[in-house]
Image (tube, rainbow, N blue to C red):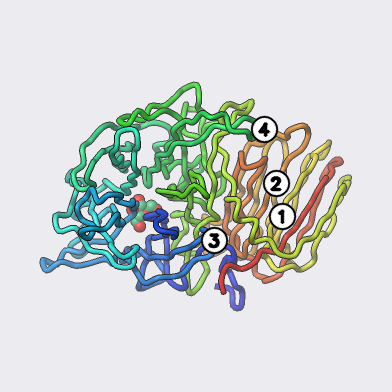
């Protein structure tokens, strides 16, 4: 990496060292939010997949714990890597695996990726259980719990389905571009209920399904009392060679997830698709899955995603760790003139990370730019309200150094994030890129909530209707912030900046 540059995000989860990918086993239990994650205990690139572990009381400040479920090798020489999966609270000990007399325990369902030497043998679903709040785990002695003889069958994610008093588990048949839904009353025996797909973008393998019930809000953000079911599938991005996440809106009757054609958000990633809208228009938000068993004080759905892209994941110029989790995102659906839209916003608690504040108002710019900050620590939140007016391009230059900048601009009905000159972009030919999300001013105004967090830029536009998340690697620790309007006039109505408080002690 760049000598002396600290790329570790200050306000989001990172491992002390080594490689991470997907969030796993997201569950709230007994006052703790658990974050398990795909982890390589032995190195700073993908390998030896195990479940790393951290806990939090607020989804923001994390306590690191030892590896929870390590890769293991059996006496026959076969190695099982612990691929992605979910965790649930087994209330009432329906599995019979909790200690006698206990009210509940944690059950993890994960993909065992079994290899012998260089040869991959199978991917099947395994169960592990913990009676001590996820600190130590036992493998179920009758594993696997679900084996269809496939090498591409993974990422189980189960949740309690209250109306029928059963668990529902989403999995993917990755290369068939299908989600497969199973049900169980004891977490050990699973029955196939239905499939969903292929549909939407099938140019990449399907991974990390997340099925959840999402409240529908009015355009003004008021609850309607109604909800729809949303299925997240990691895979699908309009630009070839990159991974991303798509979502489908529909209904779930306890057995089958059915697309609701009338409820499909616009636009879809490509003209040939009739369904499957993009969750995040940036390149670095993947494998997002929801929390289970959330308390009343933190209503769901809340999701975490992984800030990286398989297109260049192993090459990120950071040591001694690689990978970060997103800010926790609160999920709703909003009725808009473009139909229902997925809305993602940082959970309310993220406001507690706001430090020293600077305010500016009513800055008019006509074909000119202005420096807001010369050299500020690249760890801040910005709230911007701007009227694009007649300007052809209007926006901000973030992490601006002597010879570099990350440009966030609105132009021609689109929000763009340009990281081609953001600093170190040469570690992979696939890294330099421009992201683009359709965006419409509301009453002439565009709202942006921007987090610049060392090597992460996470932009929530129009109260979370569009999100663009990208990694950047500036070569200077302190960067400038410029605002600009090109070929016309624009107004920055409000501009507030907060320093981000670090979450580490
Ligand atoms: C998604 C993924 C999953 C798999 C895991 C392996 O990023 O490819 O499908 O279980 O990573 O680490």
Residue 404 appears anywhere in the view: no
Q: Which residue is mark 3?
A: 60
At numbered mark 1, what does the secondary structure look like: helix, strand or loop? strand
Q: Residues within 10 Å of mark 4 (few under 14, many from 20)?
A: few
Asked if residue 100 lies left or right of residue 223, the reply is left
Q: CA distance from mark 3 to mark 2?
A: 22 Å
Q: Are marks 1 and 2 in contact (CB under 8 Å)?
A: yes
Q: Position of residue 475 (x, y in %)?
A: 65, 69
Q: Is mark 1 within 8 Å of ligand 1?
A: no
**Image vertical order of residue 103 relative to residue 70, above or below:** above
Front-most of 429 and 60? 60
Q: Residue at x 64, y 64 (%)?
A: 423
Q: Which residue is mark 2?
A: 448
Q: Quadrant of residue 33?
A: bottom left
**Image vertical order of residue 452 relative to residue 383, above or below:** below
Q: Nearer the viewer, mark 1 or mark 3?
A: 3
Q: CA distance from mark 4 to mark 2?
A: 17 Å
**Going from the N terminus, do you reach mark 4 or mark 3 first?**
3
**Going from the N terminus, do you reach mark 4 or mark 2 first?**
4
Q: Which mark is residue 382?
A: 1
At numbered mark 2, what does the secondary structure look like: helix, strand or loop? strand
Q: CA distance from mark 4 to mark 1?
A: 22 Å
Q: Position of residue 58 (x, y in %)?
A: 52, 59
**Which residue is at the far top?**
262
Q: Nearer the viewer, mark 4 or mark 2?
A: 4
**Going from the N terminus, do you reach mark 1 or mark 3 first?**
3
Q: Which mark is residue 220?
A: 4
């Amino acid at each position: 990496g760049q000598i002396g540059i600290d790329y570790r995000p200050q306000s989001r989860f990172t491992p002390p060292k080594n490689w991470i990918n997907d969030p796993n086993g997201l569950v709230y239990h007994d006052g703790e939010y658990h974050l398990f994650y795909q982890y390589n205990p032995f190195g700073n690139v993908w390998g030896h997949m195990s479940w790393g572990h951290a806990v939090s009381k607020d989804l923001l400040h994390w306590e690191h714990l030892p590896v929870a479920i390590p890769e293991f090798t059996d006496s026959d020489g076969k190695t099982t890597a612990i691929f992605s999966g979910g965790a649930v609270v087994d209330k009432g000990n329906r599995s019979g695996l909790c200690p006698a007399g206990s009210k509940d325990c944690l059950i993890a369902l994960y993909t065992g990726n079994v290899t012998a030497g260089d040869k991959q043998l199978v991917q099947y679903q395994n169960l592990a259980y913990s009676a001590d709040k996820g600190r130590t785990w036992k493998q179920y002695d009758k594993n696997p719990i679900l084996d269809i003889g496939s090498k591409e069958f993974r990422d189980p994610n189960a949740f309690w389905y209250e109306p029928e008093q059963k668990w529902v588990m989403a999995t993917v048949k990755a290369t068939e571009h299908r989600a497969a839904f199973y049900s169980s009353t004891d977490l050990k025996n699973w029955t196939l209920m239905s499939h969903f797909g292929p549909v939407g973008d099938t140019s990449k393998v399907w991974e990390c399904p997340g099925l959840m019930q999402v409240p529908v809000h009015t355009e003004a953000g008021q609850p309607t009392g109604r909800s729809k079911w949303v299925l997240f599938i990691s895979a699908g991005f309009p630009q070839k060679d990159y991974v991303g996440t798509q979502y489908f809106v529909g209904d779930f009757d306890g057995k089958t997830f059915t697309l609701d054609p009338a409820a499909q958000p616009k636009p879809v990633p490509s003209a040939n698709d009739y369904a499957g809208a993009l969750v995040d228009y940036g390149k670095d938000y993947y494998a997002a899955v929801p929390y289970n068993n959330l308390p009343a004080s933190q209503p769901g759905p809340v999701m975490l995603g992984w800030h990286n892209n398989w297109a260049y994941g192993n090459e990120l110029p950071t040591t001694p760790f690689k990978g970060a989790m997103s800010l926790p995102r609160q999920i709703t659906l909003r009725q808009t003139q473009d139909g229902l839209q997925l809305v993602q916003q940082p959970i309310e608690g993220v406001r507690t990370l706001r430090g020293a504040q600077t305010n500016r108002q009513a800055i008019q710019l006509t074909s000119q730019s202005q420096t807001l900050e010369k050299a500020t620590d690249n760890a801040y939140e910005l709230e911007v309200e701007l009227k694009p007016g007649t300007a052809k391009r209007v926006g901000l230059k973030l992490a601006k150094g002597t010879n570099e900048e990350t440009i966030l601009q609105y132009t021609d009905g689109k929000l763009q994030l340009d990281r081609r000159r953001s600093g170190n972009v040469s570690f992979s030919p696939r890294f330099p890129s421009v992201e683009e999300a359709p965006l419409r001013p509301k009453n002439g105004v565009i709202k942006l909530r921007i987090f610049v967090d060392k090597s992460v830029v996470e932009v929530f536009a129009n109260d979370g209707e569009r999100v663009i998340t990208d990694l950047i690697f500036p070569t200077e620790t302190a960067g400038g912030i410029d605002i600009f309007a090109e070929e016309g006039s624009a107004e920055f109505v409000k501009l507030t900046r907060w320093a981000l408080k670090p979450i580490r002690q």
